[in-house]
Image (cartoon, rainbow, N blue to C red):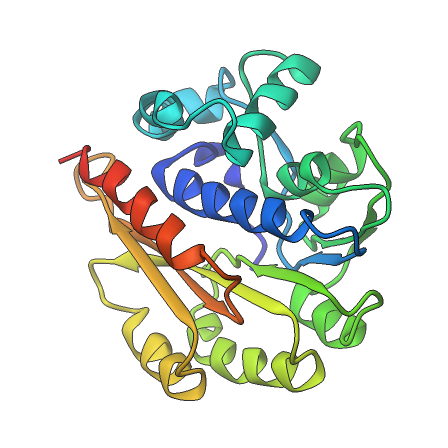
């Protein structure tokens, strides 16, 4: 199934949660002068227009980044990335995680992005990237398995499927274990939605059993519209960098202001 398009959801509260912590982790990693590898399994189109018909239709960006942009200090890595992208692409531009990574990482770092959806892949390829990236039109899980262990071995992988395919919930614990066996030093960051159906709960129980030292961080928020099934956002991070627990707690306080 390849019907999911993130343009309807870009800049929503789940994006703010995911992107703020991703930006912090990338900034932490770049404080050492050693190269790193960034891998993203489900990249999307990379750059979104919050003034476009899709974003306006759902109102998710208005309830998300439009409300919380001011909660981040100007020197926060997420705020720095948003500012740089607004300067480059306009005030209504919102970056997907690939463009956040390309903005914060350095020329010595390697970026691998996978996107299978034909239209999303075409849009991703057309982004005026600020640095070199390698874009793969293939299943993201297959790319991750093929690349690991990457060179450089130091780095981070973001796994952010749409969860349109319900098998993803069952597939992910085993997939993360396979990747970890190949790349035991890599930071593996899995995003998941918190749904009223509880579809994520069995997956998380299996992940927690497999990775007892992982960091799990969740935020809750009001449904963006009546009947919307997502009421929160979660990140499960294997090999979390030092200080991520404190940064997560700080971000959690920002989300509590939404109550």
Please state the horizontal and vertical placement of residue 14, each as a whole percent of the image: 38, 44
Q: Is residue 4 visible?
A: no
Q: In this view of the protein, which residue sits in the foreground, 58 or 245?
A: 245
Please state the horizontal and vertical placement of residue 61, each as a whole percent of the image: 39, 27
148 is higher (above) or lower (below) than 189: below
207 is higher (above) or lower (below) than 71: below
Give the left or right position of residue 48, taking residue 115 as reference: left
Please state the horizontal and vertical placement of residue 117, each as a whole percent of the image: 67, 50
Please state the horizontal and vertical placement of residue 49, each as a whole percent of the image: 56, 21
Residue 34 placement: quadrant: bottom right
Q: How many marks?
A: 0
247 is higher (above) or lower (below) than 70: below
Residue at x-position 39% and y-position 27%: 65
Residue at x-position 65% and y-position 70%: 186
Give the left or right position of residue 235, taking residue 225 as reference: right
197 is higher (above) or lower (below) than 104: below
Residue at x-position 61% and y-position 44%: 27
């Amino acid at each position: 199934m390849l019907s999911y398009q993130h343009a309807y959801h870009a800049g929503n509260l789940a994006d703010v949660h995911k992107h703020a912590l991703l930006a912090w982790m990338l900034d932490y990693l770049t404080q050492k002068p050693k190269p790193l590898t960034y891998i993203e399994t489900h990249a999307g189109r990379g750059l979104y227009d919050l003034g476009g018909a899709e974003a306006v239709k759902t109102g998710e960006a208005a309830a998300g980044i439009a409300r919380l942009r001011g909660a981040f200090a100007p020197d926060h890595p997420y705020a720095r990335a948003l500012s740089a992208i607004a300067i480059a692409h306009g005030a209504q531009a919102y970056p997907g995680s690939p463009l956040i990574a390309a903005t914060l990482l350095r020329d010595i770092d390697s970026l691998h992005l996978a996107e299978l959806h034909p239209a999303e892949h075409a849009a991703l390829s057309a982004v005026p990237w600020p640095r070199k990236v390698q874009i793969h039109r293939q299943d993201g899980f297959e790319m991750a398995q093929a690349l690991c262990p990457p060179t450089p071995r130091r780095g981070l992988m973001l796994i952010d499927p749409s969860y349109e395919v319900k098998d993803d919930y069952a597939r992910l614990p085993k997939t993360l274990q396979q990747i970890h066996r190949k790349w035991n030093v890599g930071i593996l960051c899995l995003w998941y939605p918190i749904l009223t159906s509880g579809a994520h709960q069995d997956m998380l129980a299996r992940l927690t059993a497999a990775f007892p030292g992982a960091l799990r961080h969740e935020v809750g928020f009001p449904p963006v519209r009546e009947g919307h099934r997502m009421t929160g956002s979660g990140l499960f991070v294997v090999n979390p960098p030092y200080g991520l627990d404190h940064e997560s707690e700080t971000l959690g306080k920002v989300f509590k202001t939404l109550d």
